[in-house]
Image: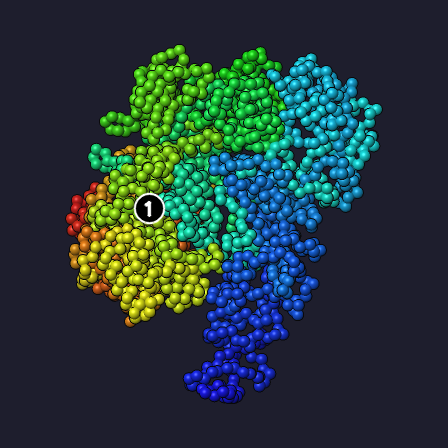
Amino acid sequence: AKLRGAGTWHHVVADEFRMFGNYTEWDGSIDFIIFELVPLRLPTGAEFRVAKFEFTDDRTLAPSTSLSPSAPPTTLMVKNVGYIVKFAGEFRTVVHKPFQLEQTGEPIPMNRGYQLCEIDEVEGNKLNEFPSRMNFIYQQKCVPIMGGNPTVDVDPRYVNLSDLHILNVPVNASIVEINSEQTLGGDLLLLSDIEDEVCSTFPNPYDNDYRGADRYNPDEVPSRFKPDKPVFARLPDGSYALYDQRLILHENTLENPKMDGGGESVLRSTIRAAKGFVAHNQTGQNSGYHIINDKNIALCINEQPNFINMEHCKLSYEPNTCQKQDIKDGGLYGTTLIDVQLVITFDDETLASLHTATLGNSTAGLVDPRYIYAASNLRYDSSNTDDVIINLPCGSGNPKSRWIPRTDLTAETCTNTLQEVSGNALKFALESSNDENSFLRDIVLWNNGDSGCDPLDELEYAMLIMTSEGCWENVHPDHLSVFDFTNYISSHPTANVIESFVDSGVMVYPSNHSMSFFEEIKDNRSLVTRVARYGDKMIVDQLADKLALNVDPGVLIALADKGTIMLENLVQRNRGGGMLVCGSPNEVAPDPELDDYFAVKNIDLDCVGCQDNYENYFAQKQTVLALNMLHAEDQLCQRMAWALYELLYVGTTTMPDNTEGNLYSYDIMTRNCFGTYDQILKEMTFSPKMGEQFNYIDSSATRFHWDAWYDETTGVRKLVFPDENYAREVMQLFSIGLHELELDGTETRDKFGREIQTYDNVNIMNNARVMTGFTYTARRGNTEELFRATKSRFEPFRIDIDKHDFFPKQSIEDGWIGDRYPLCEDLPKHHFLKIGATYRFRGGSSIPTSQYMPASWDADEKIKRFVLSPDSMLYKKLCDPDPAGNCNFSNVVTLDENLNCFGNECSVDSVIIAQISPGAFYEYIRQPCTHFSFYNNGKKVVTGVSKPSPALEWKYTHAMCANPLTAVAARSCCGISVIDRIEYNYKFEYHGEVVSAGTNEAICIANGGTVCDPTSVRAYDPMAEIDPEYNAIYPSQNTYFWTDTPCKQQILVRNDGMVAIVHEPQANPSVTARTVLFVDASASINYISVPWNRDTVTGEARFPTTSNECGGGACTVFDDKCLCDITIAENSVFDALPSSSDALQFLHVGAIDPAVYDDRSYSLIESAEGIEAYALSGTSAINSTSTIFKVTGDFGEVFFLRNLVSQVTVGGTYVLRNPVGFIDLVKVEERDAEFEVDAFLNHLTRYSSSAPFICKRLIQFFGISNPSPAYVERVVKSYIGGFYTHRGTVFGDGRYGSLAATAAAITLDKESLAPVIDEDPVSGNVREPLLKVIHLMRSLRFERRPHIKLRYGLFDGLRSKIGQSPWEAPDQFSFFSGDYATPGLIASSELVSPESQLLSISNVIGLTNGLFSLHSYGLAVADGGLGPFLTRLPSVGDYSSSVGFLTYTTVNDISDKINDLYTLMTAGRLSDDNKQVLVDAYNYFAKAHGADTGERVLLQLMSALPEFHTWNTVRKTGLARSITPSPPKASNTYKAIVFINLFGGIDSFNVLTPHSNGGCYLYDDYFEARGGDVGVGLTLDEILPIDGSSAGINGCKTFGVNSLLPSLKDIYDEGRGLFFANMGHLHKPCTNKNWLTETRTDLFSHHTMKAEAHRVDAFKEGDGPGVLGRMLDVLEDYGLAVSATSVNAHSIMIDGSPTTGRLSTAMDTSGVPRVYHREFLKGNQQELRLFLEKLHSETQENSGAFSNQWSQSFIDIWNKTDTLVETLRGIKLSTDFSSKAPDIDDISKQMKLVAELIAAKDQRGNGVNRDVFTVYMGGFDGHSELKATMNNRLPALDNAIKKFWMEMKAQGISERVTVVIGSEFGRTTTMNSNRGSDHGWGGNYFAFGGDIKGGRILGEYPLSFTDSPDNPINLGRGRILPTRSWDALWFGVAQWFGINEPTDLDQVLPNSQNFGCDLFTDSDIFVSGQSTISGCGGGVETTEVF
């Protein structure tokens, strides 16, 4: 020790001491020792140092653990000791002391491995202020390691340098330091190449495959899970650096797509690399050897053209362009991934290798030789030139011919003697051929019409044709074809003459041999197999499969050595064709000079290092969003995007950890923030995120499953329905809202003053049919994916037309989706040449994107294409040639003028794909048009082929009706060769062509045939065959053919008025064919709603039913339906020019713009304001059905409407307007489904209530909770008109729904800008907590610390701390309800305060503490901070543990400080009183604790101001604010009600089910209704039996409880649990006939039905919002002390009368926090309290209502929590609420908190007499995978119930507690197409408690689950009409709670008297109950129902 004043060191301690006397066991060696020396009584000024230690014996003892060393012990460093650190088995560095735990300094053993759980990529020794994190899993905890990430040290004393990859960086190398601010010099970038031979020994990073094993990636791949060995650089200064192999991401934006689609990267990363090939032997269907390739790694990065990127796509000719495929593969979209294949080209080298390998001398398998040769020197001679043996180029048969280039000939020598027509035809065919073989060209000369040869040249051959490419010579059709002659040679030993001709794989046919020998054998498939052509490419495995070469791996390897790795999409393609590559929004490449901020996850690579736990992926996306909000320059755009996000909320249900996918969906809002609402709604509708959240992804039409599961022998089918989730919410949440609105946002009322609902359940079902068929596109590369998948979650959905519903859909206004669109039958002739015709470029692909063609047709020269002549006007429009004739292709071409037809254009009705040149194609997108469902003169069309027996001809198999005026069926003609035999595709112009019946008949008759109903069918030509086998599941793949036979249409009417379209084709006695299933009366299930006329007195719809004898005989009874004949009448609507409003109201059929018609067919005859009338030339009368009106609509849009109404008379009695739809039932196309969805969304956004609904919500999100009607109307008009003008500046582009105009109107309106508005006490709002945090951080200049990466997260736990966090809303209804009103002034004034729904204890205090912490510590976790935990808890003012901090600095003068701050923080709203409080506080704290403290406290108080937390002014009274007092406790006993809210609508018919015990019929009925074995019903082994005799159903004494809820069975069997059967919200008892008129509620909506279930006040007559709140109001009047508490989610159920102002307590399971300030609000340190109380002191009556609400909430919560925290700390429960099952939604924690509050009943306030609690568990909205939903959630619920019941009994209070488990509604008993159920009505609920008279089922359980109109409680679609209302349950519970006076019961349940004796009294429910209902004979009893 060095004593004071002494200059020398004195030896003080020298004694021996024992260090480890208490240690009993140690299993390792000691490398080091740590201990602590504590000097006692050390004199002031003395120093203490450790000098030397020595062991006194040689015992090896274990070290002890020190508690907290002040610094790492220096004695751990031993210069001659090194520890080698490896990662994933490979060397990384050497350290010279053991790793130590950060918190204790304890060293950890260095002879074992540890799992990383957190890591910073910054060297620990470079960070002083903020230590680098490196955390290990140690003793099952993630603990930090002292010193962080070690420096790279390649110490040659411990490492053999020859074992490492080391690159010596020369002194002159260009190497720079990058990201220095982030990595403190730890990142170096090499800018120059280093030429060093050692580089060739380094591993190629592309060799490794990190994707792991799946069905595309077998485990046997050698490189699987074996990362490259690291590469080190020895820098010029002698230090070392580790090569950082960064993820390669490409620029692939809309404007700059990656031109090779990532093809080069894909090829470089294939498995082949330098390792050679492996022949893999697999078993099963494709047994044999195959060359391994890695399919799933070949992920092209570009996207197929879609409505987002189409305008920006580019044509790529790069050699390895990878193109994502979205073709329909096996009936599914998005499942086709591009494979990387090994491909051979049949050239001399490959053929020679194949020849050698197949001679029978290989190692195994091919014992016998194979004879595979290319046939050369084949020629024409006298034996084969008669056009019979082989087909000649101009022959009348198969028009295929083969040609070779003659580069040796010129135009002068390349001549022929052909007729000019023939020469031109052959020249055109050669030039337009897409054959990419460079040695040969096969052309197909279709000898019909103008495209064929002159008949004089039929026998010509071997001619020369000069083309623009050079000279071509016709050769033998099999010249250089590759054949397998093995079978022929093997069966004909003398035929080895062929082998003698062979030279290394090429057979040179002798010139002296007649060709007859070859012609005789070549087409005998049993002897000779045609393989390919010389020059063709072929995938090795396909060749091996085709020729059975895969039995021998040696053959495959021989071929592989000659092969080339290629992308599969490049193997066969159209000659000269480029590929259309399309990018994706904002997909930018990373800047290599920036740090690797964005962390991505790869399952397999992360598993290699076992560090898959340490990335905070969830927080990463929130950080990105927050940084944009904080720093983006386009702040108004960011603000609008957030408002849109709240309106169109999409959470993280499906991929919570995915960063890019979630940000992509948010970017839709940002990209379109000033676009149109239509754009956003469409993008969101097609977004996979939206589809997953609302379950319509893969939702399918009823038809799809009904037909797919149809078994004609057994009749078994699968009845499922489309998912209804989005169908409802797109209306309720995103467009029209629940109620009709005026333009100013006020609700429209009917004549009785009632709200008018915007939609009903019929609309929902119709919308659900629209939203079918949406499916993913194929996954692509360059995007983040946290798991292996074949689907993309980024790109817009495709619509699978076969899963889409084909039938018409009603609109909301009882019209049809498709009204005002023109009829397809009215399209002008050659409409593809008219103004407005649209063409989309397809690049080198001849397959359309939105119309069906088999993928195999692409690059197949046998397919006839529609090739445009260069002389065509259409060609010129599409080619847009430059002066040299080179085409300049545009992605989208829309014709701006009518064009004349040319050549083949004149012969077709329409075009699908037009070829401009080889490898250049356009898809024609016909304009949107509709079809009448019923039409006159229907014709029978037929499809399918079958051959009943070998002796008979082919027959068609299916038939249906078609409109003869539309081009929907293919050409057919009879009598050409055989009478009554149809020649299908007769003289067709291109494969896939369809024509109208008239066009077909004209061509057929012109060629001497007739159109007939054939007895047999055949292809017109073998080349024209398109495999017309009928496909019941995928009708889009069917091709129909015209007949001349009439086809009858009928309507099948169900007893509920739903109808099915029925076709009855006239029978052909010679053909056994059936009607297409979906229009067959006996097979169809495709019912649609129609707007029947209603009775003028009763209002009931009038239609034929079996009960009215099918309209008194108007129709015939067909099973339990009515089958009706129909007639169609088409009449004009107006005789004179109508007004524009009348035209829009009464005209529904759209028309073509008259300008489109040729020869001025239409002329203007009359006009008035907003309307013009056009008539056919030569007429002037308006009253014609052909008259067209041009009308300007309400939103400035122009409509062309036809003066026509088409009416369908049903059964001669009932009249309907003819339904229209976009999809023709004969020719179903994806294009038309897209049109339908567009029309549907357009219909919603233009609905009269849509604009005011959207605008009012946006105004609220912008901060004004109660905008005036005038303000709303002004914004709405800007939204509709698309413009807003402010002081001469115009905002918006004139489009409907302009968000630029809307944002300007909201923010620049006088109600936003005028200061006087602030004087209105109800202007403004309570601000959203997240926006307050962002506001403060932005205003006070938050800066993120440079080394903080996105994955650290800026925030942590925001949702639990402040109640709001991006992607963490509690449900799909976003963060708060737009109509929420807090009790008190706001509710009593009929105002709303949506954001106040978040004012819970946890949120108010969490926000306060979080902002305090931000000022004290930066954005960190300390003292309730909002940031993440990084290292340690700092001291006040220490920002080193933060991710960032506020950099705002103030001026010196206090007045200037506050003036500056109140502008920044309150926009100038700071009151003088509060300003003085701030001045006083600053002066006090600056004087008492220093200026820095004064500054900090000033900022903290600024963030606590009511003016900051609300947009309100504050006017003070000068008095302190009173705390809302707790009522005194009465002497009455305690009782509590706990309501468990299962939000989402639990499928309660899978909670309480029938059981088959005793032969109960109802179980089978239930199970069948729920879908049977493939459905959602519970099997018998999934239910627990209970006594169900109380249900009173004959033969059904046993019922079942879901086996996942055993606690319910136990409580029920204990006699303390009750089921309430079929209960739900009712206004009054009703039937399935009158429920619509007798129930005014917005049924089936989560929001409304939850409100109704919680209010139980159907007519809103009660004094308070919630039923439990009204109970407390009454009991409080009785003098009882009452308390209302909601946990984890506020509930209106416990809110009382607005006039009382009694607020419920909202708590969170994260714990009860208290306002905390470490310096001045801790223990006795309460200096801050006075100033906070003054800021929130009492206000005047004219002060801001919202600021007053905030201040009162703050003061009350502050006071309550100060005592409640201490109270709950003293509560110890007897029951452990934990469980092995995940605690979903913290439901067990919630029930535990309730149990604690019940235990503290006497300590809370003055004590409590009556408690009500609500707890929340969500996620029960089981629209998809219902069983999985229940399996996931019910175990947690069961644990919570079980443990709570145990605890109540342990507390001895169970008789005084009643628990009710409920949900807003039940679900449909029928299944939807996603194996889920949809929103229903009645449900089964449970109550339990110690006083419950249990073991019974009360109410009426359904007697049948049959989904039939005849089921009295089934409303259709399995929606069960409830037979008891919520009033019934709560009536008895209220009595038990102590309310028995009739007037008081009426106050609690204002609607109860509507139900008479259908109420349960307390004597029905409780053991202690005594009450009865007057006149009802006592309690309700149930008897058996027979």
Structural crowding at the residue carrying mark 1, measured as other residues with C-alpha within 10 Å and reported as few (<14), some (14–19) or many (≥20): many
Percent x, y for residue 929?
43, 26
- Name which quarter of the figure residue 1937 lies in: bottom left
* Kind of residue at disc 1: Phe
Relative horizontal placement of residue 371, taking residue 398 as reference (left or right): right
Q: Nearer the viewer, residue 1355 or 694?
A: 1355
- Identify the residue at image location x=77%, y=44%: 362
Q: Position of residue 922 (x, y in %)?
A: 55, 29
Q: Is residue 1909 visible?
A: no
**Can residue 1450 be seen here?**
yes
Kindly identify which residue carries mark 1: 1261
Q: Quadrant of the C terminus?
A: top left
Location of residue 565 with respect to 1633 vertically, above or below: below
Q: Is residue 1349 left or right of residue 1303?
A: right
Tell me what residue is drawn at x 51 percent, y 73 percent. 72
Q: Residue at x 52, y 18 (%)?
A: 900
Expressed as whole percent of the image width and height from the top left, the position of residue 1145 reads 31, 25
Coloring scheme of the render?
A: rainbow
Q: Secondary structure at mark 1?
A: helix
Q: Nearer the viewer, residue 576 or 1658?
A: 576
Is the residue 882 above or below the residue 1013 in the image? below
- Please state the horizontal and vertical placement of residue 1609, each as a whole percent of the image: 36, 53
On screen, residue 1092 versus residue 507, left or right, reads left
Q: Residue at x 69, y 50 (%)?
A: 275
Numbered label tally = 1
